Structure formats: C-alpha cells, structure tokens
Image: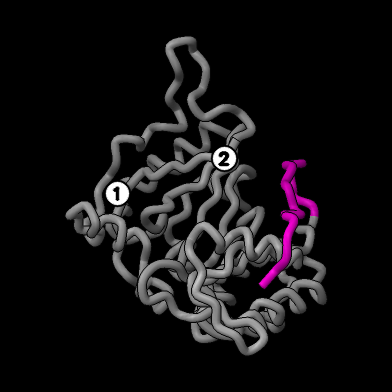
Amino acid sequence: MKDCWNPWHGCRKYSEGCLNCYVYRRDASVGRDASQVQKTREFFLPLQKSRGGEWKIPPGSLLYTCMTSDFFLEEADLWRPEAWEIMRKRPDVRFHIITKRVLRVKDCLPPDWGDGYSNVVLGATCENQRRAQERMDAFLALPVREKFLICEPLLGPIDFSPWLPGDIREIIVGGESGPGARELRYEWVLSLRAQCERAKIGFHFKQTGANFVKDGRRYFLERALQIPQARKANIDLPRVSSPENWVYITQRTQGGDFL
C-alpha cells in the first residue's frame, strides 16, 4: 500500500525548482497561503487505529512523508522530534522523505539515529547542476540507510558522475507541470539514464512534464498524458537491492508508442 502523511503543510520557496510549486498553485486556488506552515490534523496518522484495532496505515506500507512541505523546513523544528518518534514506533512502515534542504538534515536528526532508521528512505532534490554541486557532498556524507536522487522538475543537464554511485540507489526524473511549465529535454533524461547505467544504479523516468522537447519537437502535454508517455519510453533501469529485504517494483512499462 502507498499513502501520504503530511504532518505539516506549507513551505517557503527555496531554489529554482520551487518557482511553479504545485502546492502554492493548489492552495491559491482555494484562497490559502501556502507560505504559512501549519501542523496538520493528520500528524498522528501512522499511530492511529481503526475501531477494530487495526492500523489505519497497514504494516508494509510505503508512506510518502511531508509531500506538501519539506520535512527539514526551519518552521517545523519544534514538531520534527515528535515526527521522528512516530517513525520509530512504526518500524513496519517505510517512510519516504524528499528534501531540498539537504544542508539542514545533519542537524535535524534524532539522538538515536545512529547510521539511520532502517525504515526511513531519504531523497535529495537536485533540479540543475548548480544545486547538485551545492547539495551532493553533504547528502553523501549523511548517515542514511537508503538514499536516492530526484530531479523533478529537471531544469537542465546534470552531471552526477563525480558522486556516483556513492550510496545512491536510484535517480528519479520528471518534468514540470501546470501553467508556465519550463521545458524538459529528452536528451537530459537520457544523459542521466546513461550515468545510472554506468554506475549500476536504478533509474526511473517518472513523467514528461507539460513542456517536453524530444528530437527537436516540442510537445505540450495534458497532465493525464505525462506519466503514460514516460512509461511508454520504457527506459527505466532496475534499482539495486534494497536493505532490510523491502520489495520494490522496478520496471514500469505500458503499451503504445512513445512520442
């Protein structure tokens, strides 16, 4: 089972990838200010049980954490220790965290972290070469059991070869969606795939974004087509074995023709 847990909501724009943030766009559509960070009513969701005494988040679930904020946001410093404690109490749930604030992570880890909680996976966002240069050394130095990179939105070519494989297990790539979406060029995607292949790590082309350039042609794609088109490219690479014997689906294919 895959689900989301948003212990707090709202964020501050941090780098180039945040320009057209979907959270800001969605909140604005209902008259809400996404820059206001607030603890949510679902803060204790992973510990909640049904009337029958069963976990609302079943054992074995993959829980995407803080998807409408950043787990390492400064405004959440007072809430984060309790969130870590919730994760510690659910070792049977896989917590999947993505952050742009890589430089803050080390100072935000709990006292009993050691070499990492076995059920916490951490991903660093790098949207361009500048942010890769800024974040990668600090990210690789972190004591985390499982790490991945996410380049979404990918805003330009990135050369990760100085850092790969390190302890990176996968790179996930995607374009930008919504009004004013910046372009994703297919050659940037293929370059990252080639780097993953050389490093023998996983690669996942998640979605094309709304403004996709391939073979010199520009495609403006509706949201409903962005994930299917990426799947039709059929360029994913299996990720390396995960610790703790967790099972992942690695090949995501779909019939039909790519653009």
Mark 2 vs 1, N-terminal side? 2
Q: Which mark is residue 78?
A: 1
Residue 2 - label = 2
Is residue 253 at least partly visible in the picture?
no
| Numbered disc 2: secondary structure | strand
Quarter occupied by the C terminus = bottom right
Q: Nearer the viewer, mark 2 or mark 1?
A: 2
Residue 61 visible in image: yes
Q: Magenta: predominant secondary structure element? A: loop
Residue 252 falls inside the magenta stretch: yes
Contact (CB < 8 A) between labels 2 and 1? no
| Figure quadrant of the N terminus | top right
Q: Quadrant of residue 18?
A: bottom left
Q: Amino acid at mark 2?
A: Lys
For disc 1, the neighbor class at 10 Å (few under 14, some 14 to 19, many from 20) is few
Residue positioned 61% across, 83% down in the render: 158
Residue type marked 1: Leu
**Distance of mark 2 from mark 1, alpha carbons?**
27 Å
Q: Picture quarter containing residue 133?
A: bottom right
Q: Is residue 158 depicted above or below 176 in this figure?
A: below
How many marks overall? 2
Task: Describe residue 251's horizontal placement relative to residue 136 as left or right.
Answer: right
Task: Say what secondary structure mark 1 lies in.
Answer: loop
Residue 196 place in picture, x, y as percent: 75, 72
The magenta region covers 241-259
For residue 251, above or below residue 39 = below
**Residue at horizontal 34 percent and vertical 58 percent from the top:** 23
State yes or no: residue 113 in magenta: no
At horizontal 65% and vertical 66% (from top left) the residue drawn is 205
Q: Position of residue 86 (x, y in %)?
A: 45, 36
Place of residue 236 in the rendered image (x, y in percent of width and height, measured from the top left): 74, 63
The structure residue drawn at horizontal position 48% and vertical position 25%, both measured from the top left corner, is 56
